[in-house]
Image: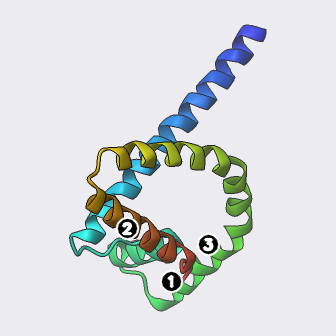
Amino acid sequence: MMRSRLAAVTLLAATFVVGAVAGGAGMMMAEHREESGVKASHGRAGFLARLTDQLDLNQSQRDSICSILERHRPTMDSMWQEVRPRFDSVRTQMRQEIRAQLRPEQQQRYQELQERRRAENRNRGCE
């Protein structure tokens, strides 16, 4: 019984780490796209924009889906708050390792990219 519990906890932790690394890599790719002039879509607004584009949603459907996203937002935010400290720890470590590979002028640009990303994240929501 104890062995299966340990295996389950280990699997859960490994899954989280893989997800955090994949999320960090995705963020870095999005930052690269932004630097190259391609506008990345983030959060609920980006999700809604992709659905609208790919499924040809009408305004009524957009409004309904936006309401659904907003209704579930507190639950999603609560879940995110539980894992955020671990995610932030892995992300900070990755960024430090990346920064160590960059020349001073690249480090400055990298910092600016991160600050721009944080500003965009503050402005997310249904639009």
Residue type pointed to by label 3: Leu
Q: Is residue 23 above or below residue 37?
A: above
Using the image, determine if residue 43 lies above or below residue 80: below
Please rate how many residues cluster around mark 3, counting C-alpha atoms within 10 Å: few if below 14, some from 14 to 19, many from 20. some
Name the mark nearer the viewer: 2 or 3: 2
Residue at the (44%, 46%) spot, across then down: 96
Residue occupying the point 40% across, 42% down: 97
Which percent across, then down, holds residue 12?
Answer: 62, 30
- Dot 1 amino acid type: Arg
- Residue 124 position in % (x across, y down): 54, 77
Q: How far apart are marks 2 and 3 (CA)?
A: 28 Å
Would residue 1 appear left or right of 31 to someone viewing this image? right
Dot 2 amino acid type: Leu
- How many numbered dots are placed on residues in this image? 3
Residues packed near mark 1 inside 10 Å, few (<14), some (14 to 19) or many (20 plus): some
Q: Which residue was labeled with disc 3?
A: 69
Secondary structure found at label 3: helix
Q: Mark 1 points at which residue?
A: 62
User: In this orientation, does residue 1 appear?
Assistant: no
**Colouring:** rainbow
Return the mark for residue 113: 2
Ranked by sequence position, the earlier of labels 2 and 3 is 3
Comparing 32 with 67, the one in front is 32
Q: Which residue lies furthest to the right in this view?
A: 1
